[in-house]
Image (cartoon, grey):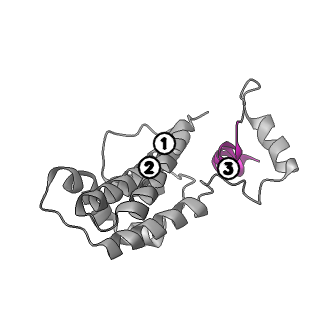
Amino acid sequence: MCDIRYFKSAYHNFEVAEKLMQYYQSDELYLNDVAYNLQQCIEKMLKAFLECKGVTVPQTHSIRKLVAMSKNNGSAIVVTDWIRENQYEIETWESETRYNFDVCLEAERIQRGLKAVRQFLEINDMVPVLSEKITDEVKEKLLKKMPKDLKIRDDFEWNCYYRILKNRL
């Protein structure tokens, strides 16, 4: 069983990005932080799905490499067109936004990224509201696939386990 704390950490990065954008969208430094957190969210999601597939994930921030690994290893993640089309740019948000103080990202571009990452999370059922796909019957089936002592604490965790295990139900 994989560690869903990785999914929670990825979602946390998204929430941080959302809050920063809400309050500081006119500040270049904070825009860079929004971009960084969006990149981290995507990276962690890709890595978490790979880990759940049993793939040893290298220490990398390369979105391109992780997308390719996801495809080649049959990861359950759905990589959206926006991520595929913007892999290189997203990848640069990890280091460029933290170490290059001359980087100035456009608020409009980051706002589109925020919307696209929200869609990416929703498509992959990584949201705090229970997916409508998870009925009581599905919950019962999921519980049969998990360790007996595992406690699912919230709807986000139900969504995670559903997404990870749905092909085995």
Tell me whether the residue at label 3 lies in contact with that at label 2, contact meaning CB atoms closer than 8 angstroms: no
**Amino acid carrying mark 2 in the image:** Asn
Which of these two is toward me, 44 or 168? 44
Magenta-tinted stretch: 153-169
Dot 2: what SS? helix
Q: Which residue is mark 2?
A: 13
Answer few, some or many: residues within 10 Å of disc 1's Cα (few below 14, many 20 plus, some between 14 and 19): some
Q: Which mark is residue 9?
A: 1
Spatial CA distance of label 2 from label 1 is 6 Å
Q: Quadrant of residue 106?
A: bottom left
Q: Disc number at residue 140?
A: none
Picture quarter with the N terminus = top right
Instruction: State the residue at coordinates (86%, 48%).
Output: 136
The residue indicated by pointer 3 is 159
Residue 85 placed where, x, y %? 37, 72
Instruction: From this view, report whether residue 39 is shown above or below residue 25.
Output: above
